[in-house]
Image (spheres, helix red, strand yellow):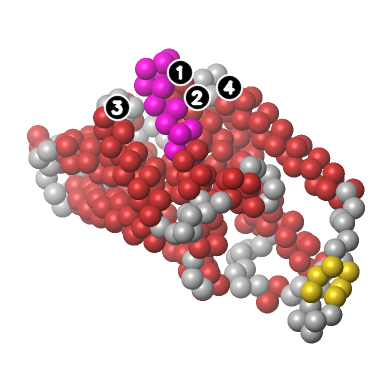
């Protein structure tokens, strides 16, 4: 296990250390394999769901029977809420569009297009695949010990289903590691440039890569491997919850920032029609996003195994917020020293 982890860590590090282009192209390859697999699964699983492909053992096509067998929420709405943090952990990465905007060419055209494509692709790949899974697997047979994709493919009679899905899952995990390393590195770089982290983390090499930030991110990420040998059953769930909480905090901040930005923008005389990308159904969409993410975050308090993530993560984020505001307030009270600046015409101006 350690050998494979070292090999993959070196691979992901090398891709991120080469250039942003190397990261983007490798992420395209990883994602393409994952996307192709999901499309094939939706086609094959959907065909079996509606009886177009015979099931193994002569089973009848389920159609939508598993959806209505025990009602929509057999264990109540609370069961849905307490699983949302794990679900949202799996949806992390959509916010990378904003992070990558700083290194993209012509972001005014590329970013709005990427946002729209992400929405439609999420609806297609996630909703359709989960619909097929839910239709093909009765609730009492659903288990966390075996991949639901493998269960469906086995029920259809696809040979080597487990091996195929293991390869695809491994590729998907490499994609997550690749994008996560990129995002965390750029976050550290941005914090450094804004004076909220060590200046050394803002240094870049000849290729424009913040190598110091990349190295420290990889080192801290490597600590997660200890969860495989130390309290594996508890620490893994804690890390999973903490990662999900990080996504919640990020999306809450994005929603709140949008509301604050629009309010400030119009107050300063800005015109909405001049915005390059306008959120549809504003302010309903950001308010809905803000409320639902807050509800999911609060739901952690009702899950004993995940409660520690809320206590530790919540305290940490509040601490960061307090330190930031104290620094901003302190910087505002410090008088900027006057200095002479050369102008193009050879004159000097005191600022």
Q: Earlier in the sequence, mark 1 or mark 3?
A: 3
In the rendering, which numbered label is found on residue 234?
Answer: 1
Badge 3 density bin: few <14, some 14–19, many ≥20, Cα 10 Å: few
Q: In the current view of this chain or complex, which residue is farthest to the front?
A: 346
Q: Which residues are magenta?
A: 217-234
The image position of residue 132, as x and y in percent, is 30, 46
Q: Earlier in the sequence, mark 4 or mark 2?
A: 2
Q: Residue under circle 4?
A: 308
Q: Residue under circle 2?
A: 238
- Observer-nearest residue: 272 or 212? 212
**Secondary structure under badge 2?**
helix
Where the N terminus falls, by quadrant? top left
Magenta includes 123?
no
**Taking 311 as reference, is 101 left or right?**
left
Q: Residue under circle 3?
A: 2
Residue drawn at x 85%, y 63% is 339
Residue drawn at x 52%, y 54% is 204
Q: Is residue 233 above or below residue 58?
A: above
């Amino acid at each position: 296990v350690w050998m494979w982890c070292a090999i993959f860590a070196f691979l992901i590090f090398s891709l991120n250390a080469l250039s942003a282009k190397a990261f983007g192209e490798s992420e395209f390859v990883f994602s393409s394999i994952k996307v192709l697999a999901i499309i094939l699964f939706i086609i094959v699983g959907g065909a079996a769901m509606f009886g177009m492909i015979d099931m193994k053992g002569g089973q009848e096509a389920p159609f939508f029977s598993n959806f209505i067998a025990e009602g929509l929420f057999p264990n109540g709405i609370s069961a849905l809420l307490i699983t949302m943090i794990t679900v949202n952990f799996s949806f992390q990465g959509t916010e990378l569009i904003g992070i990558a905007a700083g290194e993209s060419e012509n972001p005014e055209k590329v970013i709005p297009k990427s946002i729209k494509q992400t929405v439609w692709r999420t609806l297609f790949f996630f909703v359709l695949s989960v619909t097929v899974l839910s239709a093909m697997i009765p609730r009492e047979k659903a288990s966390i010990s075996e991949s639901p994709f493998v269960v469906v493919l086995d029920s259809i009679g696809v040979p080597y289903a487990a091996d195929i899905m293991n390869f695809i899952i491994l590729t998907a995990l490499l994609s997550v590691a690749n994008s996560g390393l990129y995002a965390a590195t750029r976050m550290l770089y941005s914090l450094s440039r804004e004076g909220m982290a060590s200046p050394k983390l803002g240094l870049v090499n000849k290729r424009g890569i913040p190598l110091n930030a990349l190295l420290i991110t990889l080192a801290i990420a490597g600590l997660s491997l200890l969860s495989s040998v130390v309290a594996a059953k508890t620490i893994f769930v804690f890390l999973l919850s903490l990662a999900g909480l990080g996504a919640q905090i990020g999306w809450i901040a994005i929603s709140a920032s949008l509301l604050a930005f629009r309010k400030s923008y119009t107050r300063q005389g800005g015109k909405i029609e001049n915005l390059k990308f306008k959120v549809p159904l504003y302010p309903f969409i950001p308010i809905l996003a803000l409320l639902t993410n807050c509800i999911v975050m609060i739901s952690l308090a009702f899950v004993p195994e995940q409660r520690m993530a809320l206590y530790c993560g919540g305290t940490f984020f509040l601490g960061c917020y307090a330190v930031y505001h104290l620094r901003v307030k302190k910087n505002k009270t410090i008088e900027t020293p006057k200095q002479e600046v050369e102008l193009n015409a050879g004159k000097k101006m005191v600022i």
